[in-house]
Amino acid sequence: MIGPFEANGSAHTTKKVSVVFVLGGPGSGKGTQCANIVEHFGYTHLSAGDLLRAEIKSGSENGTMIQNMIKEGKIVPSEVTIKLLQRAIEENGNDKFLIDGFPRNEENRAAFEAVTGIEPEFVLFFDCSEEEMERRLLCRNQGREDDNIETIRKRFKVYMESSLPVIEYYNAKGKVKKIDAARPVGEVFEAVKAVFTPPSDKVKAASWSFKWND
Ligand code: ADP
Ligand code: C5P
Ligand code: MG
């Protein structure tokens, strides 16, 4: 458990939460794998991109600004994204969160830490080539305004210039669990499962398979 996290910015309510940051380039499979992790390991999935898109739909005063930034593949000011993440954490009864697609740059990282006091348990990093990510994004078919080749190129540039340094930052702290994400979904999830399974359960699983194969 990591904390303290002061809900509503008030010193009265403190919610202790455990957070895993899920990072990787656009189309590396973060959302797909988070859905699997939720099902198997009881986390709540918070995608920063999904929260921003919901904010546009809700007709909020920031909606037009967010929409324009997403169309250009730019990173929305941290203040906006962090408020959405904080609200989602507060409103949820769970205490285990996968935060997907955040922090996306140094400003995101530093501001989140300063505002919430939350340090991630670890960072799950989906490593995938640009060629493969581009193929996946062009097939995604979810009607996203940023899944076109022009915006995809801009998103890759932002990823290389602003997001990879954040992954490097956590890597230097020994917090990154790197997954080869270029493989089929099931194989990637096998590697993900190994990261989330406590060592004692891995021993149990190994002895069971020993008995069966004996
Ligand atoms: P992200 O959230 O990282 O942008 P998604 O999970 O939305 O990525 O995946 C992008 C697209 O690629 C989706 O259409 C998804 O179904 C597909 N996809 C995800 N993982 C894989 C994989 N391992 N192999 C092939 N396609 C994948
Ligand atoms: O993660 P996802 O691909 O859904 O993000 C879509 C877009 O949302 C990004 O390209 C960016 O414009 C915006 N975003 C952001 N800050 C984040 C996450 C997403 O501005 N931390
Ligand atoms: Mg996603």
Image (tube, rainbow, N blue to C red):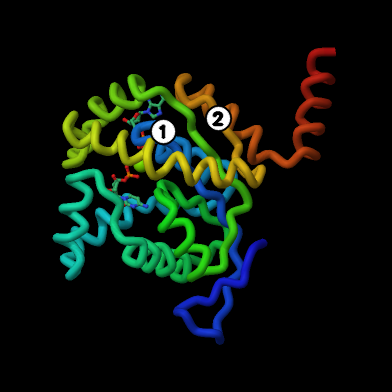
N-terminal of the pair, mark 2 or mark 1, is 1
Instruction: Give the structural element (helix, strand or loop) at label 1.
Output: loop
Q: As displayed, is residue 40 above or below residue 15?
A: above
> What is the three-letter code of the residue carrying label 1?
Gly
Q: As displayed, is residue 96 above or below residue 70?
A: below
Q: Which mark is residue 179?
A: 2
Q: Residue at x 47, y 42 (%)?
A: 165
Q: Residue at x 47, y 56 (%)?
A: 109
> What is the three-letter code of the residue carrying label 2?
Ile
Q: Residue at x 47, y 65 (%)?
A: 89
Q: Along the line of sight, which residue is nearer the eye, 56 or 149? A: 149
Query: Relative to 30, is 188 on the left or the right?
Result: right
Q: How many marks?
A: 2
Could you tell me residue 119's position as x and y percent? 59, 59
Q: Residue at x 49, y 38 (%)?
A: 36
Q: Is mark 2 within 8 Å of ligand 1?
A: no
Of labels 2 and 1, the one closer to you: 2
Could you tell me residue 140's position as x and y percent? 26, 30
Q: Is mark 1 within 8 Å of ligand 1?
A: yes
Q: Name the residue tied to disc 1.
A: 29
